[in-house]
Image (cartoon, coloured by chain):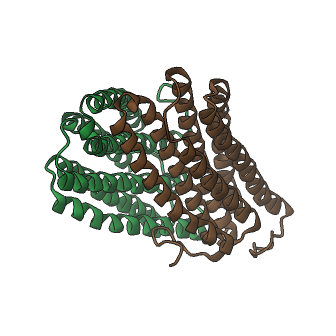
Chain colours: A green, B brown
Amino acid sequence: MDKLNLDQHISRQFNEDLEEIKTSMLEMGGLVEMQVGDAIRALEDADSRLAERVIEVESRIDEMEMDIDETCTTLIARRQPAASDLRLVTAVSKTIRDLERIGDEAQKIAKMAIKLSEEGEAPRGYTEVRHIGNCVRKMLNDSLDAFSRFDAEAAIATMKEDRQVDMDYKSALREMITYMMEDPRSISRSMNILWALRSLERVGDHAKNICEHIVYLVQGRDIRHRGPDA
Amino acid sequence: MDKLNLDQHISRQFNEDLEEIKTSMLEMGGLVEMQVGDAIRALEDADSRLAERVIEVESRIDEMEMDIDETCTTLIARRQPAASDLRLVTAVSKTIRDLERIGDEAQKIAKMAIKLSEEGEAPRGYTEVRHIGNCVRKMLNDSLDAFSRFDAEAAIATMKEDRQVDMDYKSALREMITYMMEDPRSISRSMNILWALRSLERVGDHAKNICEHIVYLVQGRDIRHRGPDA
């Protein structure tokens, strides 16, 4: 575990426990990444089958969150970690909550995909979904990568990308509202795209949160609500 | 502290520390409740001044979250709590995160209030805002009350209310979409109401999360993702 001096433990078991929660978290992260990708693809292709699969897999993510969370609590109770060990457990515990929320957003996008496959495609908005989808998927991937390497600088760089996502999201919203005014019959279908865009923007927020947990873990600084420049 | 047998501690200071994080959390909860109420009122009255105040107070809530969170971490490191003590610290730490998110939603509603005071009132949707607003404010109040009394039964009863909120929210959404189709010129203003409704629905979700933390605290059961009937 580079870039972070975790306390040296007399107990090898303790080291293994710490490694294990990190590994489980990254595994959960991998699955969540896949869910986001699949949900976007289901929306783009109006593929209700793929969307159904995303919804099914969601319960596995929920279980993973609860399992890892329990392991974290047990580890605190048994090993009484301090300093960077405790920060690692805390950061993992918080990160899995964000990952679970990202999973929720993927599920919401999948539900919109099913609606669109029933009601027919929306007239517009797919380019925006693809663009913002790619941005937040990259943010999520980079944040998990930064966690695995305990790389606070990479985390800060990733956090900064959220600003552009927010701007692109706002601009996409404005365009969608304009389309809806021009073609009121498409409002219901356009709203599905709008909710999907909203979910993607939330994925970016959660990836940013994960980056904040990494900075806390590595540097011991709580930079929430202060922005990456603090 | 009734209904929960917190470990008896030799150190009076430890007891005081545990009481303190609970009290701080309830104080933060009180402020968040006020924020939600003010945000709804600002929206209903198109009162941009009140809305600005909600946005200002938000930073105080953020600070409270960070302070309490730090106290929780220090308490774990110094006192090495176990069993119900550790569950209390964990439950507080998770609850303040939900409270902070509720504060965020209040801020979002306040921003919609400012937009509506600029663009002019939306033609419809205020009845729905008031109704759903009252439901989720009650949920939030009841959940904080249940926490202060360590009352898992009350928490479970409060959780169940979220179903009705979700149904009312979905029905309000459908109505708003119908209005927008009938009067496309109002889409932009109606969207502000729609986002506010969405935020209120999220407040209900977070109040439900707080109830789940209470059940975990009192009974040691993790009932997330399982529903109140589990």
Res A56 quadrant in image: bottom left
Name the residue at the front extreme.
B182
Q: Report the side of A202 relative to B65 (left or right).
A: left
Where A31 sits versus B107, above or below? below
Res B213 quadrant in image: bottom right
Query: Of B137 and A206, which appears nearest the observer?
Result: B137
Residue at the (42%, 64%) spot, across then down: A65
Residue A223 visible: no
Where A54 sits versus A150, above or below? below
Q: Report the side of B134 relative to B188 (left or right).
A: right
Name the residue at the bottom extreme.
B230
At which x and y percent is residue B103?
60, 42
At which x and y percent is residue A136?
30, 40
Q: Report the side of B116 relative to A177 (left or right).
A: right
At which x and y percent is residue B110?
58, 33
Res B50 quadrant in image: top right
Across the whole image, how many numbered discs are drawn on residues?
A: 0
Query: Of A218 and A63, which appears nearest the observer?
Result: A63
Residue at the (65%, 28%) spot, across then down: B56
Name the residue at the top extreme.
B118
Where A57 sits versus B42, above or below? below
At which x and y percent is residue A39?
24, 52
Residue at the (52%, 63%) spot, across then down: B164
Residue B127 visible: yes
Where B180 sits versus B149, above or below? above
Query: Of B75 and A136, which appears nearest the observer?
Result: A136
Q: Report the side of A28 relative to B49 (left or right).
A: left
